[in-house]
Amino acid sequence: MAQDRQAPLELLADRVKRYGATALDVVKEHADYRTQILQLAAVDMVKTYRGSALGWLWAVIKPSVTIFVYWFAFSVGLRAAGAVNGFPFFLWLVAGIVPWFYMQEMLTQGSTTLKRYDYLVTKIRFPVSTISTFVSLSKLYVHTALLMIVVVLFILFGYPVDIYFLQLPVYIVLMFMFFTLWSMFASLLSAMSKDFANVVNSFVTAVFWVSGIMWDVNSINNPLLAKLLLFNPVTFIATGYRNVFIYKRWFFQDTFALFAFAVMLAGMAGLALYTFHRLRRDIADVL
Amino acid sequence: MRSDDIAIEFKNVSKRYRLYRSDKHRFLGIFSNRIAFKEVYANSHLSFTVKRGESVAIIGSNGAGKSTMLKMITGVVFPTTGQVTVDGRVSAMLELTAGFDPEFTGRENVHLRGQLWGLDKDEVADLERAVVEFADIGDYIDQPMRTYSSGMKARVGFAISASINPEILVVDEALSVGDKNFRQKCNDKIREIMDKEHVTVIFVTHSSGAAEAICDRGLVLERGRLVFDGPIAAAVDYYEGPHDRTVTAAGAG
């Protein structure tokens, strides 16, 4: 066939053009549907907490119970909970685990967004690429509310807001970007295969324990391992929040960590674009 | 013919479904072109144009490819090859009970739908008023839709589709909504929409009587192919008459 005989360079240029067009479509869909995205994020949030007597309180109760259990196990049970950088273990735990709650929801529920909103794909004409965005945004609203509570908690413990808090928006945006892209990628794949959703669910607990949310990544002695761990976006974000609340460091101080995260973010964007490009037209056929 | 006179245009449109042996094979098929699959053409080489204001019946037996074609008109399914152009706001009365969020009330679902279409606040309020009045399901409008009977869901679904001032109306004749009175009300409403100038109607059916009553033109589908396109009476004759089906069957295989 004529196509096979095309020069590799031409083939590459053609591919770049087609993927570029897809990326442009995604941006355009987001711009065209920006109002709907904001409205649907609110709708998704209402939907999550609707139908129970305590409603919105669950957004606070669930994380509080988890935090209490870990605090109890580590400080009372294991007695492995000393102060970190002058902050009580409890606050150190809270600072790292609150972003994890968002990341955990995005890892699990984020990978099933298309199944949850299948009627937007198969029954109504609606841009598929925006579905993960509004779900992620809805989770981010809840996360931001929790974060406010954390700030108040620090103030109550006698640690006032300082200049380092200014970088919270940076970490929030980076976290949102990475996990929205993840959700776009993962929800397409788990719509195609149940196995994928199961794989994700069974690895979430593992991700939690290896990502340094319950232990201090700065305590790793092996320098190579310490560098490798920085390529884990969950570690980067959780450590970033602790840099703000506990360690009092700027995000640009550790350039290698920033570089590692940028690599992973670009990789995730590539994966998301690749799967979206390949599956966007087929996804309505299988849901 | 000026291009803005055209409501729907199919240019050599084919829709291929890939059937894999299992979910696992389908999953692997995303990444590799070497995974074996069977190809089924739901539509092949469809070409036709529908002018603004025309009412066209799509006639064909089960599996002729009517649903796939309609899904392409409504824009939820994409052609494998060829080009589908649709110009105008499409309202599809296909699966009326589908497309709702079961956790939300009827009223909230109306709002949601209005927002999805990008209506502004006033337009959504108008839509809500029209739907509540037409669906006529009383206090249930403020109950979660998971508690609805299929008849109630269909009432709300029909009311929404009928209330958005469609420019292109797609009606599935198989839709039987609620009791006799409500069905009459629906038929009247469809006629009212059709009587408006420049509303294009696509009417899907596998029987011929209803098609002749409503439409001027008929398209007959058979095994994914367009086998007849012409005046409604002739189309019905073609569909019901004895003609050599084996030729097209062999062609599709």
Image (cartoon, rainbow, N blue to C red):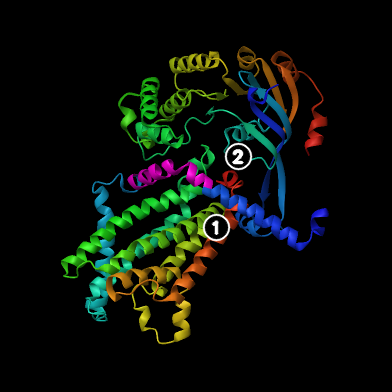
Is label 2 in a helix, a strand or a loop? loop
Q: Residues within 10 Å of mark 1 (few under 14, many from 20)?
A: many
Q: Chain of mark 1?
A: A
Residue A281: image x %, image y %? 61, 46
Chain holding disc 2? B
The residues colored magenta run A28-46
Report how far apart the C-alphas of labels 1 and 2 lie in the structure. 21 Å
Q: In which quadrant is the C terminus of chain B drawn?
A: top right
Q: Amino acid at mark 1?
A: Ala
Query: Who is closer to the viewer here, A180 or B60?
Result: A180
Residue B105, numbered circle: none
Closest to the camera, between mark 1 and mark 2, is 1
Kindly identify the amino acid type of the residue bearing the numbered disc 2. Val
The x, y position of residue A129, in whole percent, is: 52, 48
Label 2: how many Cα within 10 Å (few below 14, some 14–19, many 20+): many
List the residue tagged with mark 1.
Answer: A272
Instruction: Report the front residue among B11 and B102.
Output: B11
Q: Image check: B125 left or right of B88?
A: left
In the rendered image, the vertical position of residue A259 relative to residue B139, given as above or below: below
> Could you tell me if residue B222 is visible in this image?
no
Residue identifier under label 2: B77
Q: Position of residue A60 (x, y in %)?
A: 25, 57
